[in-house]
């Protein structure tokens, strides 16, 4: 019934607000604000090509740092011919992972494209045929970018371990905690991914014959229920981690040593 109402309203070109009287626009508006702020900040930070390392902290936007012009080299894969920001060499991987995430798709289809803007609302434009044709059919690469995302979790965990190694030996600073919280939230986001859940047990037909996989699948399903929450928390933490390292590297903030 509701679908029919939406369909007919859409056919008539009715304004979306004609169908719902509640504040349906609040969530899309918040999504535009949150995602927009992150995209602007992360793009700006990637272009800076400076202040991304404050011994022993490396910003997650620049990790792994793989170019000869890095302030703190993780491993050199690219020679001195690369003169742009090293962030551009690596940010595409987590960027595509997030861009093709099932949760973010819903968020930006609704908030930016209005396709549709909310439940029981018509699409803003006609002719939407889902993800079956170019270019949205490429959203299917998400399952493959998951493997890259796992690699990034390993690398960022290594960074967090290195954040315990100060010039005068072992220690814990506020920055150490910032990097650890960030990697934990990123791991929760990554391992609550729908592709991860499917990979671990989604295609098992008879769980009683695969009890180990069932246990993993069951736990991942619990994480998966909170995937949207982890998506926002990890987006915030990765931005704040870069900001913290940046402010310390610029001398605006003094890192407090706890241990
Ligand atoms: S579904 Fe969101 S990261 Fe895979």
Image (cartoon, rainbow, N blue to C red):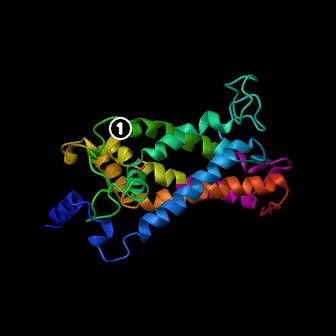
In the rendered image, which quarter is residue 141 located in?
Answer: top left
In the rendered image, which quarter is residue 114 located in?
Answer: bottom left
| Residue 207 within the magenta-colored segment of the rendering | no
Question: In the drawing, does residue 130 fall left or right of residue 29?
Answer: left
In the rendered image, which quarter is residue 80 located in?
Answer: top right
The answer to whether one can see residue 159 in this image is no
The answer to whether one can see residue 105 in this image is yes
Q: Which residue is mark 1?
A: 140
Question: In the drawing, does residue 1 fall left or right of residue 10?
Answer: left
- Which sits in the foreground, 96 or 24? 24
- Could you say where residue 74 lies in the image, as x and y percent from the top left? 70, 35
- Could you say where residue 60 lies in the image, as x and y percent from the top left? 65, 47
How dense is the environment of label 1, judged by Cα within 10 Å: few (below 14), some, or many (20 and up)? some
| Residue 168 within the magenta-colored segment of the rendering | yes
Report the magenta residues as a range: 161-185
Count of numbered badges drawn on the protein: 1
Residue shown at 70%/27% (left/top)?
Answer: 76
10 versus 77 height, above or below: below
- Could you say where residue 43 lies in the image, as x and y percent from the top left? 63, 47
Residue shown at 31%/42% (left/top)?
Answer: 131
- Could you say where residue 49 lies in the image, as x and y percent from the top left? 74, 41
Residue shown at 25%/43% (left/top)?
Answer: 210
């Amino acid at each position: 019934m509701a679908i029919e109402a939406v369909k007919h309203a859409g056919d008539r070109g009715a304004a979306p607000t004609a169908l719902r009287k509640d504040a349906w626009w609040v969530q899309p508006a918040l999504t535009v604000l949150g995602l927009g702020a992150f995209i602007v900040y992360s793009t700006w930070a990637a272009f800076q090509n400076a202040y991304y390392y404050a011994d022993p902290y490396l910003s997650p936007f620049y990790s792994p740092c793989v170019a000869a012009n890095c302030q703190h080299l993780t491993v050199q894969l690219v020679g001195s011919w690369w003169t742009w920001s090293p962030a551009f060499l690596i940010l595409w991987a987590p960027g595509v992972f997030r861009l093709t995430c099932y949760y973010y798709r819903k968020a930006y289809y609704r908030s930016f494209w209005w396709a549709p803007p909310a439940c029981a609302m018509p699409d803003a434009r006609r002719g939407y045929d889902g993800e079956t044709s170019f270019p949205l059919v490429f959203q299917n690469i998400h399952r493959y970018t998951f493997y890259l995302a796992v690699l990034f979790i390993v690398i960022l965990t290594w960074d967090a371990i290195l954040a315990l190694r100060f010039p005068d030996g072992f220690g814990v600073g506020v920055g150490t905690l910032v990097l650890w919280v960030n990697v934990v939230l990123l791991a929760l986001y990554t391992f609550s991914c729908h592709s991860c859940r499917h990979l671990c047990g989604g295609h098992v037909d008879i769980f009683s014959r695969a009890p180990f996989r069932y246990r993993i699948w069951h736990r991942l399903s619990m994480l998966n229920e909170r995937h949207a929450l982890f998506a926002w928390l990890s987006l915030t933490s990765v931005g704040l981690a870069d900001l913290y390292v940046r402010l310390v590297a610029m001398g605006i903030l003094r890192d407090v040593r706890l241990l």
